Amino acid sequence: MKRSALVLLICCVFYACNPSKPDGKPIKPLLASRISIQRNIVYGSDDISKQALDLYLQGRHTGEPNWFVLVEESRPTVIHFHGGAWLDGDKTQEDMRILPYLDRGWHVVNVNYRLGENTAPKAVDDAMCALLWVSKNAENYRFDTDKIVLTGFSAGGHLALISGLLNSKSKSHDCFVGDSLNIRAVVNWFGISDIAALDTYFQFKLFPPKFNYPRRWIGNERGLQSISKLYSPINHITPDSPSIFTIHGTNDLVVPFNQSVALHKALDKAGVRNRLISLEDRNHGGFSDEEGVYVFDQVFIFLADQGVREFTPFLFP
């Protein structure tokens, strides 16, 4: 059963999974024929090499004269933030991670942000302002502003969490868009929820200083306490917070598993819909194919419960 589910997912990477024709023959249009990719659209003004995003848009390649026709109806949209400890990484490394959303007919916004040592909290500011760009451009690109999902891995998980939570608190940021985007859920892949606790973890474990990426991102202990208070997701949970789905390996040495345990206890206390999938003995993202298939199945079940269902892709005429 697990193997057949894996084969199905692999097929869907290359083909949009569609129902059969009336004659019973399967319809398998190429996913590549349905997606237009627009690279490096600038959303900020400080560092345009980093404040840029890529769009993966649903529609149809038609050839000349228009070449590509965007879908007419608005589509659920996932906004993705890459990982890299706030110090490194690039949106292009995440291309394969967004395929399950594309296969289900979603638009995807894949975000770069300012990063590096002593740059905190610029990554958070950029995540918030990328959402503002999505809000302002929703009509042009057919983003469904009522069905927005945020996601990311590791530091990207932190950015998805904090931008989702801040946008549930009015006037929390200059780029607040909680009144124009309905963030239905955050899909958090082993993201940081408590920055100060993560710093303490690295000191307690006696890792060399270079491994303490929160302190490298922030720069000093005094600044760390302030940044943690303002930008740790666990400090911004309210009954109005978006639903949160977390995936985390119990043997993660980069972002310890107890970060997610504490997050979900706080969500439960606030009455926020949430789910934590614990992958036993797994480290920082080292999951098997079978586990990946299972997790994405559960992600989309959870999102459907939050009112964000998959979209039936186009059929060939």
Image (tube, rainbow, N blue to C red):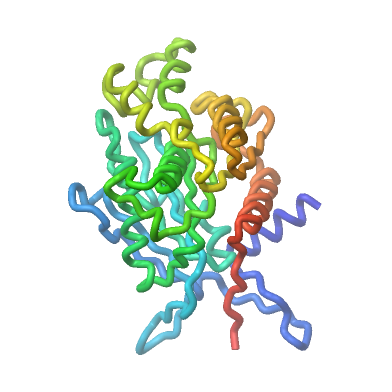
Observer-nearest of 139 and 59: 139
Observer-nearest of 131 and 62: 131
Q: Is residue 228 above or below residue 276?
A: above
Identity of the residue drawn at 47% across and 78% down: 71
Left or right: residue 83 versus residue 312 is left
Q: Position of residue 10 (x, y in %)?
A: 64, 59
Q: Position of residue 129 (x, y in %)?
A: 30, 51
Identity of the residue drawn at 61% across and 45% down: 273
Quadrant of the image for the C terminus? bottom right
Observer-nearest of 203 and 73: 73
Identity of the residue drawn at 47% across and 51% down: 150
Q: Residue furthest right?
A: 1
Q: Position of residue 284 (x, y in %)?
A: 54, 32
Q: Position of residue 62 (x, y in %)?
A: 44, 85
Q: Is residue 20 above or below residue 232?
A: below
Observer-nearest of 254 and 301: 301
Q: How many marks?
A: 0
The answer to whether residue 82 is visible is: no
- Splitting the image into 4 quarters, where does residue 16 fall? bottom right
Q: Residue furthest left?
A: 46
The answer to whether residue 128 is visible is: yes
Identity of the residue drawn at 69% across and 30% down: 280
Q: Is residue 245 above or below residue 214?
A: below
- Splitting the image into 4 quarters, where does residue 275 fall? top right
